[in-house]
């Protein structure tokens, strides 16, 4: 049985958790990170020397980095999350996974941390504003891409939807008054109809 290490309110853990739920196979989740600690224990560091979650364990194999986990589950989990057969569509999946990690999530990081991990009196408003401006540029790119599309790539749900939706949901719920993004909202509403999305969409941020 697969084992997923990580707390359910971590956006990176949520990506792996959503993918596992989509596969519909049994797995175990072990609380780790944040208030749960564990990540600095020698046994955990043997799984991930970075001391971060998530980590996926299966049959003595340990894998870290959330998007690497998504790719692995897509390649080994059967039809539910299978990558597109066409090389260019497959490349688009990887493109959006990288964009989520290196552009969108990175852009909103300061706005999220300042809003949820700092007391109001201690928040750096200039840092929040700069982060929000970068995030809005990413949100505009995403909204434009989703115009006329039901999914991130091609005609079926896949791991690009999981990764980008986790980021988009987080951005739209940070209390910085993000601009309306009708195509993103429509896409998220459609994804919210999937039972497996409940571990992310609709959950409070923390």
Image (cartoon, grey):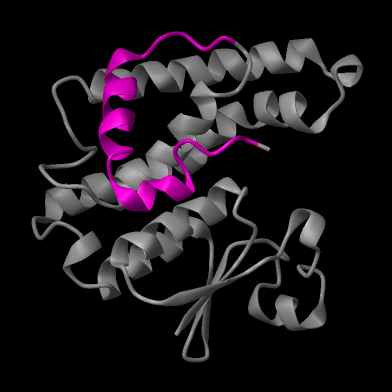
The N terminus lies in quadrant: bottom left
- How many numbered marks does the figure carry? 0
Determine the residue positioned at 44% across, 63% down.
Answer: 68
Quadrant placement of the C terminus: top right
Residue 181 position (above or below residue 37): above
Residue 50 quadrant? bottom right
In the displayed structure image, the side of residue 182 where residue 42 appears, left or right:
right
Question: Which residue is drawn at the image coordinates 81% and 64% (left, top)?
Answer: 37
* Image location of residue 181, percent across then percent down: 36, 14
Q: Is residue 204 magenta?
A: yes
Q: For the point 28% across and 46% down, which residue is it?
A: 194
The span picked out in magenta is 177-205
In the image, residue 1 sits, relative to residue 17, either above or below, namely below
Q: Is residue 152 left or right of residue 185?
A: left
- Is residue 156 shown to the viewer in this render? yes
Left or right, 107 with reference to 151: right
Q: Is residue 5 left or right of residue 124?
A: left
Q: Quadrant of residue 152?
A: top left
**Residue 173 location in percent, x, y?**
55, 24
Location of residue 136 in the rendering, given as x and y in whole percent from the top left corner:
48, 15
201 is higher (above) or lower (below) than 41: above
Of all residues, the one furthest to the bottom in this rendering is 60
Q: Magenta span has 50?
A: no
Q: Residue at x 67, y 23 (%)?
A: 111
* Image coordinates for residue 100, horizontal then vertical, percent: 44, 39
Q: Is residue 103 visible?
A: no
Image position of 43 with respect to 200: above or below: below
């Amino acid at each position: 049985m697969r084992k997923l290490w990580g707390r359910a309110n971590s956006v990176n853990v949520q990506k792996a958790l959503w993918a596992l739920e989509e596969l519909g196979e049994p797995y175990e989740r072990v609380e780790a990170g944040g208030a749960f600690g564990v990540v600095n224990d020698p046994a955990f560091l043997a799984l991930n020397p970075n001391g971060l979650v998530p980590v996926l364990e299966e049959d003595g194999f340990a894998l870290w980095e959330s998007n690497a986990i998504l790719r692995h589950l897509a390649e080994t989990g059967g039809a539910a999350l299978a990558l597109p057969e066409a090389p260019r569509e497959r490349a688009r999946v990887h493109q959006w996974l990288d964009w989520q990690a290196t552009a969108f999530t990175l852009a909103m990081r300061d706005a999220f941390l300042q809003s949820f991990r700092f007391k109001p009196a201690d928040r750096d408003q200039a840092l929040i504003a700069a982060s929000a401006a970068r995030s809005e540029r990413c949100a505009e790119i995403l909204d434009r891409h989703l115009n006329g599309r039901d999914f991130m790539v091609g005609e079926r749900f896949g791991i690009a939807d999981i990764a980008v939706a986790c980021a988009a949901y987080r951005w739209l719920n940070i209390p910085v008054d993000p601009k309306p993004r009708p195509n993103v909202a429509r896409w998220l509403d459609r994804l919210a109809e999937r039972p497996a999305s409940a571990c992310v969409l609709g959950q409070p941020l923390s």
